């Protein structure tokens, strides 16, 4: 093959080992991609140390997948591997006949899974040898005798083993193939359990335990390595994370007990059915497609009370015991890392690792000084209007609002009260659902436009079609789905061309659901962008998203900022074709109130839930006080109370199912607070600096897309403050951007509250017991 100028220059520079004379990375990469430069020769030079490894790694990052395969040359240095095409996912048609029923039914005790001791799986541990040469082949089997130089063999790390960058990449490539195989099987089992048949609990438990055991093996092996010879800081970071195995470090029996407890909680939630208020014999109502809709649409206070109370009562049996088991085993796992740690330390590990050990104190400060003054103004106004609607015998003049009257299960979304609480009655209001109906906008249209908000910035699109979504419609008639919350299921980066994650989306055309659609699309794009990045990094190891190393929640902040752009007047007009709202003050106040009703109550609800969760997991709240403390914190942060007496036979903290997602509320708080700062920074950096934030909508800007991609790709591999700085221009969380954007409607609330009462409108401080700050 005729050598090009670029490769001749490379060879000459290598001979003299003159780094400054090496050709530009883009030049050599382009010529390798086109086949002009023999990739095998370049790879050989890297292996022989003729060119710096850092230079060669940078070149490989710019290669196409085909070029990477050519560059690999042999199995020993194969960093990129194309996996076979996967068959389309289909839910299993029938459960295994021997699998026990896990579903609890109305009026009958639930049949719960019992943890069983799993047989030990014969995996090699650090320092163990096989009957042959003591090395693992790339398929996970032991090496044969004779000390073969087979390039497909990976050394098992032994205590004190020193590794360099090249051997680290080889080990990670092996780990990646192992992890991908086990994770893909796990995903299939989770998918079937969550979307098709909740009696598949035992299969789901087996898959989860197998996956956690693999991570325990990775952590054990990583602990034995000497990292002092690694030059690449990203590799050092990765192995340091691998050493922290999280819950996977528990024994096999404890792992099975932990996963079984959480699976039983999920099936309890999914199997709960209650009776209709008017049709007493119709007893098949579930949360997602029935209860939440009725709580949002009804104005009959007796009907609201029925659904609120009956749903919670249906979930209380055995749930506190199961959650207590979960907390106990999390605590045991934490103590395996540090005898002074507790379950909450394990949940908060990603933030402590990201130099945010004081995050809870920061959240408390932001809530008290910046957010709660706005919230209590909204609370006072809502109580006044609800008292007008339901009467003085239903709503007190002062104090907490009965929680069943606020339009959602946990009083965390007051969007259903938009018509009641609009500031200016004779001005236009958003009324998102009505506008969708008028413009024939369906949920599939909202899904598509939520994705377009990202692809218009140059980000990778999602590859999930409507056929796949139809299988995930948890509100469909006859749905037996366990997925009671919108969430994203990780598809384990199975191949370069296939979808990376599946999002379980809301299924209604409301403003609240549209905002969640946009936020969830941000999380899907996080998986997509990181997957592309990992394949570019060759070793492709998914440490940024897996056990013990979840995202900070900044993907939700990005999603929230995109949602603010989407629901601005220009965004609604451009994305959904809605006629532009009039630009008068009354209309703008009504639009801001719609945003406030969605966003402020969920911050208050997550503050209450987070405080309860932290106190339970640190041991401050025993199981015997779960429910009383729950309502104490709900009153302090949200100003809501139960409509009837609730005691410790109830477990109201489990009403919305979020306890099965331990980082749900911390991520929602970080995302909810930072989204306004992200939106403000984007508008000032890439938009018109003189435009009001409530009017700003940056829909097409490739440079903004680059900013977002950089944050999504890096995830927790960079400190929280660094990531926040890139997104917002500041290294600390703040609520000031939210205060600024909602200032006009907040001022209106103050004036209204002062006009209808001579007392201070912020009467929350007169009846709430102050909380002690987070430690």
Image (cartoon, helix red, strand yellow):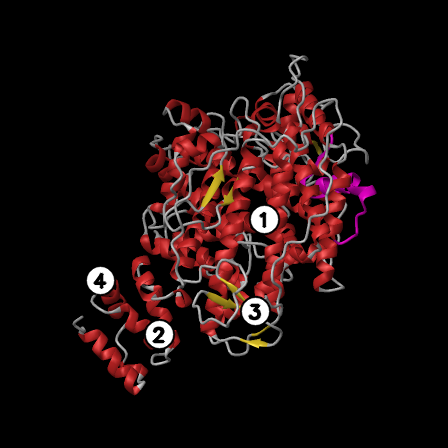
Estimate the spatial distance between the alpha carbons at disc 3 and disc 2, rounded to whole Å.
33 Å
- Looking at the image, residue 140 sits to the left or right of residue 118; the answer is left
User: What is the quadrant of the C terminus in the image?
Assistant: bottom right
Q: Position of residue 714 (x, y in %)?
A: 46, 60
> Residue reaching furthest right?
624
Q: 511 or 261: nearer the eye?
A: 261
Helix, strand or loop for the magenta stretch, by majority: helix
Q: Secondary structure at mark 1?
A: helix
Q: Which residues are magenta?
A: 618-642
Residue receiving disc 3:
134
N-terminal of the pair, mark 1 or mark 3, is 3
Earlier-in-chain disc, 2 versus 1: 2
Q: Which residue is mark 4?
A: 34
Residue 510 in the image: above or below residue 461: above
Residue to which mark 1 is pinned:
669
Identified at 37% across, 43% down, the residue is 453
Image height of 23 relative to 552, above or below: below
Question: What secondary structure is marked by label 2?
Answer: helix
């Amino acid at each position: 093959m005729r050598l090009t100028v670029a490769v001749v220059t490379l060879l000459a520079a290598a001979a003299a080992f003159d780094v400054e004379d090496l050709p530009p990375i883009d030049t050599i990469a382009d010529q390798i991609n086109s086949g002009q430069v023999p990739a095998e020769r370049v790879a050989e030079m890297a292996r022989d140390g003729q060119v710096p490894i850092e230079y060669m790694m940078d070149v490989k990052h710019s290669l196409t997948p085909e070029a990477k395969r050519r560059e690999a040359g042999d199995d020993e240095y194969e960093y990129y591997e194309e996996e076979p095409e996967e068959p389309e996912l289909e839910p299993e048609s029938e459960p295994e006949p021997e699998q026990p029923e896990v579903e609890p039914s109305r009026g009958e005790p639930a049949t719960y899974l019992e943890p069983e001791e799993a047989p030990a799986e014969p995996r090699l541990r650090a320092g163990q040898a096989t009957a042959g040469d003591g090395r693992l082949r790339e398929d996970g089997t032991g090496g044969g005798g004779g000390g073969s130089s087979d390039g497909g063999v990976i050394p098992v790390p032994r205590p004190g083993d020193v590794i360099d960058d090249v051997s680290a990449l080889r080990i990670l490539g092996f780990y990646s193939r192992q992890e991908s195989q086990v994770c893909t099987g796990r995903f299939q089992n989770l998918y079937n359990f969550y979307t098709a048949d909740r009696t598949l609990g035992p299969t789901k438990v087996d898959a989860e335990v197998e996956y956690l055991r693999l991570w325990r093996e990775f952590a054990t092996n990583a602990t034995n390595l000497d990292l002092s010879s690694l030059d690449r800081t990203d590799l050092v970071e990765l192995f340091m994370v691998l050493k922290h195995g999280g819950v996977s470090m528990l024994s096999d029996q404890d792992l099975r007990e932990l996963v079984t407890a959480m699976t039983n909680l999920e099936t309890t939630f999914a199997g709960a059915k209650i009776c209709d208020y008017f049709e007493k014999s119709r007893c098949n109502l579930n949360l997602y497609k029935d209860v939440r809709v009725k709580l949002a649409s009804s104005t009959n206070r007796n009907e609201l009370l029925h659904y609120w109370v009956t749903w919670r009562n249906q979930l209380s049996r055995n749930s506190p015991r199961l959650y207590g088991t979960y907390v106990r085993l999390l605590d045991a796992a934490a103590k395996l890392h540090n005898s002074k740690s507790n379950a909450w330390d394990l949940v908060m590990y990603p933030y402590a690792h990201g130099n945010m050990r004081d995050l809870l104190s920061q959240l408390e400060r932001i809530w008290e000084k910046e957010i709660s003054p706005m919230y209590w103004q909204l609370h006072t106004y809502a109580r006044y209007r609800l008292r007008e609607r339901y009467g003085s015998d239903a709503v007190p003049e002062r104090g907490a609002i009965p929680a069943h009257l606020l339009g959602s299960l946990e009083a965390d979304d007051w969007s259903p009260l938009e018509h009641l609480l609009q500031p200016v009655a004779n001005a236009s209001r958003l009324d998102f659902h009505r506008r969708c109906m008028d413009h024939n906008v369906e949920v599939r249209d909202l899904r598509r436009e939520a994705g377009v908000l990202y692809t218009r910035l140059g980000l990778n699109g999602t590859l999930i079609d409507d056929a796949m979504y139809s299988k995930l419609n948890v509100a469909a008639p006859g749905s037996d789905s366990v997925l009671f919350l919108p969430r994203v299921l990780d598809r384990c980066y199975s191949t370069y061309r296939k979808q990376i994650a599946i999002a379980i989306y809301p299924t209604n055309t409301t403003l609240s659901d549209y905002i969640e659609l946009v936020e969830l699309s941000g999380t899907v794009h996080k998986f997509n962008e990181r997957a592309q990045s990992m394949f570019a990094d060759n070793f492709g190891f998914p440490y940024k998203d897996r056990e013990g190393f979840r995202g900070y929640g900044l993907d939700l902040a990005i999603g929230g900022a995109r949602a603010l752009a989407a629901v601005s007047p220009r965004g609604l007009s451009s994305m959904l074709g809605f006629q532009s709202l009039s630009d008068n003050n009354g209309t703008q106040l009504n639009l801001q109130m719609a945003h406030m009703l969605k966003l402020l109550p969920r911050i208050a609800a997550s503050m209450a839930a987070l405080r309860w969760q932290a106190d339970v997991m640190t041991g401050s709240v025993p199981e015997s006080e779960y429910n009383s403390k729950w309502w104490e914190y709900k009153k302090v942060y949200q100003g809501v109370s139960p409509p009837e007496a609730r005691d410790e036979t109830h477990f109201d903290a489990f009403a919305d199912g979020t306890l099965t997602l331990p980082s749900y509320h911390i991520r929602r708080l970080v995302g909810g607070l930072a989204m306004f700062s992200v939106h403000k920074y984007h508008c000032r950096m890439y938009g018109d600096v003189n435009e009001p934030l409530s009017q700003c909508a940056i829909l097409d800007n490739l440079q903004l897309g680059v900013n977002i991609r950089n944050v999504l790709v890096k995830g927790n591999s960079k400190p929280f403050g660094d990531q926040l700085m890139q997104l917002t221009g500041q290294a600390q969380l703040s609520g000031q951007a939210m205060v600024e954007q909602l200032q006009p409607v907040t001022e209106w609330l103050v004036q209204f509250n002062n006009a209808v009462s001579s007392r201070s409108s912020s009467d929350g401080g007169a009846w709430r017991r102050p909380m002690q700050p987070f430690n």
